[in-house]
Amino acid sequence: MKQLMTEYHKSHLNRTNQLIHYVCVPLIFWSISAALWTLKLPLVINAAIVMTSLLMLYYLLKSIKVFATMLLFTLACLAINYGLESMGLPLLWIAVVVFVLAWIGQFIGHHIEGKKPSFFQDLQFLLIGPAWVVFKFFNIRL
């Protein structure tokens, strides 16, 4: 995990790009969980529960510390989904708009950085990005 985070960091050295990532990556993560939340499945409530369970397994296999940290972040996202749905808000549409705007922000950040997003190199970085942001933002060491 340390090697993956170090490699991810190489495309995120510019302070402005980092600040954009601190906002946009969590929003993208949340928006995906929110969109999946709206896909109801028998026996498991919804697709967000299934996908985040698989994601937590990935993190657990990589690092206990990353797993524990991302579990807290993921549970917060799922709680937000539950709350917004309970208020009767159009969760899917909110998620789609947030997803699109946050990705626009990400590409602006990478334009400023002058480097391509890491996931162009390896799709695994789509899973590393959220952990990198949480660890970097809260100054958590691996």
Image (cartoon, rainbow, N blue to C red):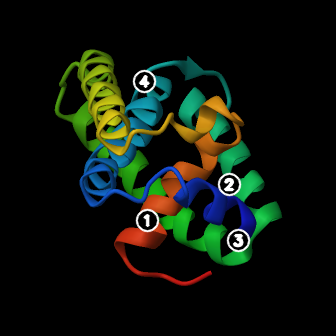
Secondary element at tag 4: helix
Tell me the residue that label 1 is attached to. 134
Q: Nearer the viewer, mark 1 or mark 4?
A: 1
Mark 1 and mark 3: Cα distance apart in space: 14 Å
Mark 4 and mark 3: Cα distance apart in space: 30 Å
Quarter placement of the C terminus: bottom right
Residue type at numbered disc 1: Val
Residue type at numbered disc 2: Met
Q: Is residue 46 visible?
A: no
Secondary element at tag 3: helix
Residue occupying image coordinates x 26% and y 43%? 83
Whether the residues at callouts 1 and 2 have beta carbons within 8 Å, the answer is no
Q: Residues within 10 Å of mark 2 (few under 14, many from 20)?
A: some
Tell me the residue that label 3 is attached to. 2
Q: Is residue 126 left or right of residue 74?
A: right
87 or 104: nearer the viewer = 104
Residue occupying image coordinates x 35% and y 29%? 107
- Give the mark, 1 or 3, whose residue is nearer the N terminus: 3
Q: Position of residue 106 (x, y in %)?
A: 35, 35
- Give the mark, 3 or 2, whose residue is nearer the N terminus: 3
Q: Which mark is residue 35?
A: 4
- In the displayed orientation, state which residue is furthest to the front: 114
Q: Which mark is residue 56?
A: 2
Mark 3 and mark 2: Cα distance apart in space: 17 Å
126 or 113: nearer the viewer = 113
- Give the mark, 1 or 4, whose residue is nearer the N terminus: 4
Residue type at numbered disc 3: Lys
Residue type at numbered disc 4: Ala
In this figure, what is the number of numbered marks?
Answer: 4
Indicate whether 28 appears above or below 39. below
Q: Nearer the viewer, mark 3 or mark 2?
A: 3
